[in-house]
Image (cartoon, rainbow, N blue to C red):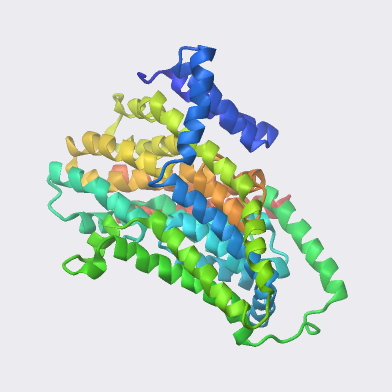
Amino acid sequence: MEATWWSIIPPLLAIGFAIATREVLLSLFIGIVSGCLILAGFSLTSGLPDTFQTIFASAADPEWNTPILAFALLLGGLTALLQKSGATERFGLWALSKVKSRRGAQLVTMFTGYAIFVDDYFNSLAVGQIARPITDKYGVSRAKLAYIIDSTAAPICVLIPLSSWGAYILSLIAEPIQTYGVGTDAFSAFLATIPANYYAITALLLVITIIWFKMDFSVMKKHEVKAQESMQAEAAATTMEERPKIPFSSALDLLLPILTMILATLLFFLNSGGLFEGGVGLMDAAGNGNITTSLVYGVVLSIVVAGLLYLPRKKMKAKEFISTITKGMESMLGGVLILIFAWSLGDIIGRLETGEFLASFVQDSIPFWIIPAIIFVLSGLMAFATGTSWGTFAIMIPISAAIIGSTQPEWLLAAIGAVLAGAVFGDHSSPISDTTILSSLGADCDLMDHVTTQIPYAIVAAVASIVGYIAFGITSSVWLGLGVSILALIGILFFINKRTASS
C-alpha cells in the first residue's frame, strides 16, 4: 500500500487509547483491527480474517518472535524458582548488608544495567530479577526501577559494538559508508557514531544525575512517596539491625543462575556466529550470531543450574520444581500477549508504510544546518509510532545517508548517530515498544505507570539532544555538539530543580 495519511491512524489509535484508557491489550487490538481494515479497503470480510492471521503469524515467527516469547516465559519460570526456593529473599538480605541507602540500591541497578550489554531484551528482564529485592527493601518504587532498567538497556546496547544492537547496526551502515566513500571500515564507522548519539549519552547521564541528586519529577515523585511509606510501615515491625546477617554463599543461590544465564547466552551467541570454529573474528561472530535462540539456551541452562543448587540441598521439593516453573510462566502471559499484539501492530504499520510516510517529510527544502536535528526528531516520531528502534534504523539510515551523503558526506556518520539517538528516544517514549513492555515486566510494574513516569525524563534528554544537533549543524563539530547537549541537560535540570524548590 502506498504511504498516505491513513498509515498513521492505527498507531495513533493504539497509543491514544492506551494513554486514555490504560487498557494496553484492547488499545493494541484496536490499532491492529483498524490497520487491517485500512489495508482491506474497509472490507470486514477481508479485514477481520487478516487481523487474526497477522496475530497468529506474529506469535509463530520462528526466527525472532517465538524464541523471544519462549525466553520471556522461561524467565518467568526461573523467577518463580528463585522466589520459591528463597534465593531472592536471601540475596535481598545479603545485599542489604552491602547497600546502605536508597541511592545505593538505585546505583546497583544502574551499574547492573551497564554490565548486561549483550541485548536489551535480556537486560530489561535480567536486571529486574537482580535489582528488585534490593530496591523493594529500600522503598524504591517499581516505576523508578522500570525507568532505571529501560534507560540503561537500549542506551547502553546502542553504544556497544559487541551487542546484538551493535551487530545489527554494523550490518546497516556497511553499505552507506562504502557508497558515499567514508573511507573507513564498518567497525570504525560505528565507533565514530558513538559521540554523535547524543540521546543515548544524555539519557545515561540523566539516570545517574536523577539518582545522585534525588530529582524525581512530579509523576514519579508520587510513586516514590508511596513506596517509601510502604517501606516505613514494614520497617516499624523489623528494623535494619534486627535483620539477620546472611553470608555470601546464600547470595550465590540467586547470583549463580543469573550469571549462568548471562555467560551462557554470550557464549551461545558467539558460538552461533562461528567464533569457536576457527577463522572467524569476534566482530564477525557477533554480526552473524543468533541472539534469540541464545537467550533461550541461556535461560534453560540457568534453570538446570538452579535445580542442581536447590534440589540436593532441599531448598525446594522435587515435585514442586516443574509446577513452580509453570506457575512462573503463567505470570508472564499478560506481558507475552502484549508483545504479540505489539509485534502484530508493527507488521501492520510496515505494510501501511507508516515509516516511509513519516520519512518523506525530511526531504522538503529546509536549511541544511537543521537537518541533523530533524533527522533526530523524525526518527523519534517513527520509533514512537511504530514501537521499534530496529525498524526505524532500517528505514531511516538509508534515507539519511542518501540526503546527507550526496551533499555533505563528512556529516554522514553524525547523521547516522542522530538516527540511532532518535530511534532510542522514540522507543523509550512509546507504550507499544517491546523494550518498554519488557522493562515494565522486569520491574513488575504496570506498563502505563512506567510509560507516564518515564516520558518526562525522555523528553528532557531529547530536548538537550536537539540543542546539540543544532549546534552540530552550525559548527560541523560532533564533539562540540555533544558538549552543548550536556550543558543543555544541566541547564534544563537546574531550571526544573529551581522551579520545584520554589513551588
Picture coordinates of residue 329, whole percent (x, y): 61, 55
Q: Residue lying furthest front in this view?
A: 319
Q: Nearer the viewer, residue 291 or 498?
A: 291
Q: Where 360 sits versus 109, above or below?
A: above
**Residue 463 visible to an observer of this rendering:** no
Number of on-image labels: 0
Instruction: Please state if 316 lies on the left or on the right of 146 as rendered.
Output: right
Q: Residue at x 41, y 65 (%)?
A: 265
**Residue 160 visible to an observer of this rendering:** yes
Picture coordinates of residue 292, whole percent (x, y): 41, 54
Quadrant assignment for the N terminus = top left
Q: Residue at x 34, y 55 (%)?
A: 290
Q: Where 447 sits versus 329, above or below?
A: above
Q: Quadrant of residue 24?
A: top right
Instruction: Please state if 135 lies on the left or on the right of 166 as rendered.
Output: right
Q: Nearer the viewer, residue 364 or 455?
A: 455
Picture coordinates of residue 116, whole percent (x, y): 45, 65
Q: Residue at x 49, y 73 (%)?
A: 259
Q: Where 157 sits versus 58, above or below?
A: below
Picture coordinates of residue 213, whole percent (x, y): 61, 64
